[in-house]
Image (spheres, helix red, strand yellow):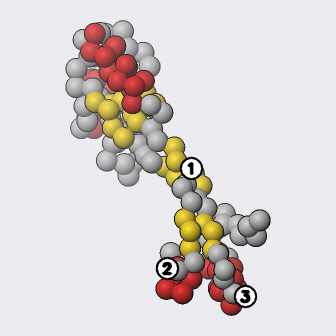
Amino acid sequence: LSMGAVIAVHLVARHPDLVRSCMVTGAMMVGVTGAQRRVAELKERGVTNFFIMQNDTSPLRYAISLGVFKSDGAAQKLVADLQRQGVRGVRILPRGPQVTRAGYQYRQIDAAERDRLIGIADNYSGVTLTRCS
């Protein structure tokens, strides 16, 4: 979003609220048959908590998700537990940061700059402008 040099001078960005997470996954599978074969191997080793990724556009299509975690420590614990069960080819992939909300403050702007910001914000759904106190 480009707002021009005049307005950008007055911009103070606040840290967005971030959700950082990671996913534990098995080796990438080629096709649904490979994924089903991997699921059978997991079941043989007593693993029951998994999900076959099926998003048509994702590079992770047919990958086996073994869990999504907010902390690396929890993901690493699962990897260690799976390795003790004899599961090989398990890795941790980052899933973030995923921005849930970002805020910007514009200081000392005049009425024309404020009107321009309102016009820009009107082009995006979910954007709200409030007066800072």
Q: Please indicate, yes or no, whether residue 51 appears anywhere in the rendered image.
A: no
- Please tell me in which quadrant of the rendered image residue 89 appears: top left
Judged by depth in the image, the label closer to the viewer, 3 or 2, is 3
The amino acid beneath tag 3 is Ala
Kindly identify which numbered label has been placed on residue 2: 2
Mark 3 vs 2: CB contact within 8 A: no
Crowding near the residue tagged with mark 1, few <14, some 14–19, many ≥20 C-alpha atoms within 10 Å: few
Q: Where in the figure is residue 93, as x and y percent of width and height?
A: 33, 37
Q: To which quarter of the image does residue 91 belong?
A: top left
In whole angstroms, how far apart are the C-alphas of marks 3 and 2? 19 Å
User: Residue 103: where, in percent of width, then height?
Assistant: 61, 62
Q: Circle 2 — which element?
A: loop
Whether residues under marks 1 and 3 lie with C-beta atoms below 8 angstroms apart, the answer is no
The residue singled out by tag 3 in the image is 111
Question: How far apart in space, not on screen, are marks 1 and 3 (Cα)?
Answer: 29 Å
Q: Residue at x 49, y 49 (%)?
A: 98
- Residue 106 lies, with reference to residue 58, above or below; the image says below
